[in-house]
Image (spheres, rainbow, N blue to C red):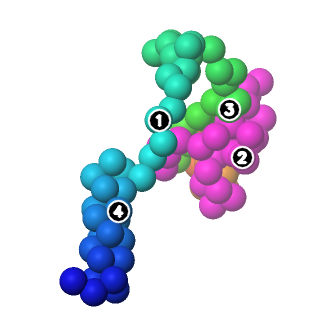
């Protein structure tokens, strides 16, 4: 067997080994792996429902309108304008 063939076989065996093991090193397991760790994260935003199209919109990104002492949230200017038009027709 030629030295080139031996090198090729060695490289193929190494690649097969890496594919089987996933190419990852042994990692130490984290000591504090708790399934409730997600509940400890602070809530960054709340989803609000658009009254026109009923889509959910993050409160910080929504277009809001004060109406009858409460705040109404919309996904777009179009929905806000439709709401204003509907409220004008109801009066």
**Of the image marks 4 and 2, the number of the one nearer the N terminus:** 4
**Of the image marks 4 and 1, the number of the one nearer the N terminus:** 4
Q: Which residue is mark 1?
A: 26
Please tell me which residue is depicted at 47% across the width and 35% down the height of the picture. 26
Residue depth check, mark 4 versus mark 2: number of the one nearer the observer: 4
Q: What span is in magenta?
A: 53-79
Calculate the distance from the C-alpha at mark 1 to the C-alpha at mark 2. 43 Å
What percent of the width, then of the height, locates residue 10? Answer: 32, 69
Residue depth check, mark 3 versus mark 1: number of the one nearer the observer: 1
Viewer can see residue 4: yes
84, above or below 15, in the image: above
Mark 3 vs 2: CB contact within 8 A: yes
Q: Which residue is mark 3?
A: 45
Total labels: the figure holds 4
**Of the image marks 3 and 2, the number of the one nearer the N terminus:** 3
Task: Identify the element where label 4 is drawn.
Answer: helix
Viewer can see residue 19: no
Task: Identify the element where label 2 is drawn.
Answer: loop
Task: Choose between 2 and 72: the one closer to the eye.
Answer: 2
């Amino acid at each position: 067997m030629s030295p080139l063939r031996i090198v090729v076989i060695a490289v193929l065996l190494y690649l097969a080994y890496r594919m089987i093991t996933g190419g990852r090193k042994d990692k130490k397991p984290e000591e504090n792996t708790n399934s409730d760790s997600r509940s400890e994260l602070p809530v960054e935003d709340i989803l609000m429902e658009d009254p026109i199209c009923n889509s959910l919109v993050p409160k910080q990104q929504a277009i809001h309108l004060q109406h009858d002492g409460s705040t109404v949230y919309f996904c777009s200017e179009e929905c806000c304008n439709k709401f204003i038009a509907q409220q004008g027709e109801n009066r």
